[in-house]
């Protein structure tokens, strides 16, 4: 009975939570782990879940806090162990190799993916979180103030600075051009 109640409360929000977790972690395995950790912590709190008025932002807040906690744990762990592989690159390569789409389309998608990833990587984690939650996942400023425990003005100003940084990155020239040729045909 308790399991069904829990599933009926949280189940409708799982796709949104997973998408948000994936955007935070950029890795499906870590997103699965993050969701699992949140659900394990929430399951015994069924009565509290029933009392929450706006469950989606509340769940996003719990997910975000668990993500921050997991990053803190990871930083402590990384001091002891070097990362062996980049799961995101492996997953990206697997998707690119398994798709049946036209090569031109794939090339364009890969270029776009790389550009967006590089642009998001220029942001600090707080800015990346704000852009992800607001511009990609569609959370309102009001919801973000609740989720992140920030004042509305702070959310707006940080979002503005993050977008300006992204725009600046996306508008400038590539940092490493393939070749530069002067007017006389010689490379610079």
Image (cartoon, rainbow, N blue to C red):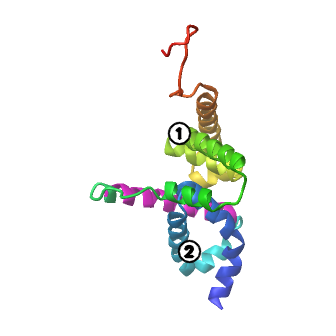
Q: What residue is rendered at 49% in x and 16% in y?
A: 187
Q: How many marks?
A: 2
Q: Which SS class for mark 2?
A: helix
Q: Is residue 70 magenta?
A: yes
Specify the segment rendered in magenta. Answer: 56-76
x then y, percent, for residue 33: 50, 69
x then y, percent, for residue 166: 61, 34
Q: In the displayed image of the protein, which residue is found farthest to the left?
A: 80
- Which quadrant of the rendered structure holds the N terminus? bottom right
Q: For residue 64, which quarter of the picture?
A: bottom right
- Mark sitting earlier along the chain (2/1): 2
Q: Is residue 10 magenta?
A: no
Q: For residue 81, which quarter of the picture?
A: bottom left
x then y, percent, for residue 28: 55, 64
Instruction: Reply above or below: 86 against 180.
Output: below
Q: What is the number of the mark on residue 39?
A: 2
Front residue of this view, candidates 34 and 114: 114
């Amino acid at each position: 009975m308790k399991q069904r109640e829990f599933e009926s409360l949280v189940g409708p929000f799982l796709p949104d939570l997973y998408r948000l977790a994936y955007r935070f972690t950029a890795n499906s395995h870590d997103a699965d782990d993050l969701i699992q950790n949140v659900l394990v912590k929430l399951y015994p709190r069924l009565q509290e879940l029933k009392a929450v008025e706006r469950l989606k932002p509340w769940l996003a807040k719990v997910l975000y806090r668990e993500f921050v906690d997991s990053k803190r744990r990871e930083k402590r762990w990384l001091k002891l162990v070097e990362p062996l592989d980049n799961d995101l690159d492996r997953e990206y390569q697997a998707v690119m190799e398994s798709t049946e789409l036209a090569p031109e389309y794939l090339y364009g998608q890969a270029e776009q993916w790389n550009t967006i990833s590089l642009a998001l990587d220029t942001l600090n984690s707080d800015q990346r979180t704000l852009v992800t939650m607001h511009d990609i996942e569609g959370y309102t400023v009001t919801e973000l103030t609740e989720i992140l425990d920030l004042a509305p003005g702070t959310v707006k100003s940080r979002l503005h600075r993050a977008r300006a940084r992204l725009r600046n990155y996306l508008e400038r020239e590539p940092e490493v051009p393939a070749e530069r040729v002067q007017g006389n045909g010689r490379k610079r």
